[in-house]
Amino acid sequence: TEKAVTHGFFSLPQFFGIGGVAQVILGRGEFGEYLSINLAFGIGVTMGIHAAGGISGAHMNASISFTHCVLGNLPWRKLPAYIIGQFLGSFLASFLVFCMYYDALCEYSEGHYIVTGPNGTAGIFATYPAPYMTLLGGFVNEVGFLATAVLMLCVLAIYDKKNNGALEGTQAVITGLLVLVIGMAMGINTGYAINPSRDLPPRIFTAIAGWGVEVFRAGDYWWWVPIVAPTLGSLAGALAYKLLIDFHNQTALEGGDGKGKDDLQTDPV
C-alpha cells in the first residue's frame, strides 16, 4: 500500500504529457505540434512503467486499476491506495508544470486564466470537448467505450503470456506506443481522456490555481465524463478480451486443441 502511494506520488506520464501540451499551446505552435503531445504522453507512459513497474506494477490509470480488481488481478483493499497515489502524482505533476510555465501562461493570456476559447489555457491541464461535441457524443467517443475499451483490450493482450504477449522487456515500449497511437487516431474530439487519474486531479488543480469553478462548468459540465466513461470503457474492453480471446485460450489450455500445458505460458496478467 505504501509503495503504491509512493510510486504514484509523482506521475511521469502526466508531467511529460501536460508539459508537452503546455509547450505546444504556449509556444503558439513554434515549439511543437499535436504529434508532440502524443509523443510526450506515450513516452511518459513508457518511462512511468520503467520507473515504477517493479514496485507496484506501474498502475497509473484508475479505470484500469479498478478493472483489474473486477478481474481478480488486484485485491480490492489495495485499490484506494493506488488511486490516491495516482491522484497525488497527477496533481503534483500539474503543479510542477504550472510553476515551470508560469511566466509563459501569464504572457499568453495577458495575466488572465481563461478556461476555453482562443486564449483558453485550462485545456493544458485537463480535457475539454471540442465546440461541436455533445456530452453523449463525447461519452461514447474516444473518452468512453471506444478508446478506453481499445486501451484495456490491448493492455491485456500485451501482458497475456497465455496468448501472444509482448516479448519480455518490451512491454513498456509497446504500451507507450499504444497510448501514442490512440492519441494520433482518436484525440481530436475530446483529447482522449482515457484515464480519470490524468483528468480529475489537474482539473481540481486549475480550479485552485486561478481558473476557478468554470473548469467544472465548461463543456456543459463535462468534468464527470472523463471519470465515468473510461471506467465503463475499461470494463467493456476487458469483457471483450475475455469473451473473444482469453476464453478460447483457456479452452486450449485444457487440451481442446491438442496443446498441453507446457506449450502455453500461463502467467497472470
Image: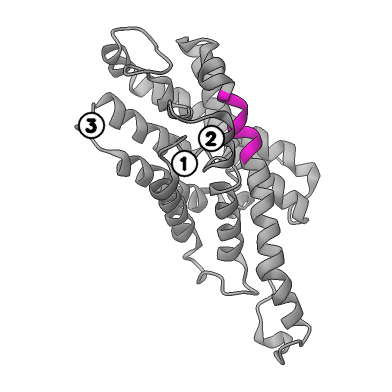
80 to the left or right of 55:
right
* Relative horizontal placement of residue 139, taking residue 114 as reference (left or right): right
Give the residue number, with chain letter if any, for mark 3. 29
Q: In which quarter of the image is residue 122?
A: top left
> Quadrant location of residue 263?
bottom right
Which numbered dot is residue 179?
none
Q: Which of 61 and 77 is in front in this view?
A: 61
Which residue lies at the image location 78% right of the left edge and 49% below the top edge? 75
Residue range in magenta is: 222-229
Image x and y of residue 162, in percent: 65, 74
Q: Which amino acid does label 3 sit on?
A: Gly
Its colouring scheme is one colour
Label 1 element class: helix
Q: Compared with residue 81, is residue 167 higher up or lower down, i.e. above or below?
A: below
Q: Residues within 10 Å of mark 3 (few under 14, many from 20)?
A: few
| Of residues 48 and 207, the one drawn nearer to the viewer in this rendering | 207
Looking at the image, the residue that sits furthest to the bottom is 258
Q: Which of marks 2 and 1 is nearer the N terminus?
A: 1
Residue 13 is tagged as 1
Q: Locate residue 265, reporting x and y percent.
A: 65, 77
Q: Where in the figure is residue 15, as x and y percent of width and height?
A: 43, 35
Judge depth for marks 3 and 2 and give the one in front. 3
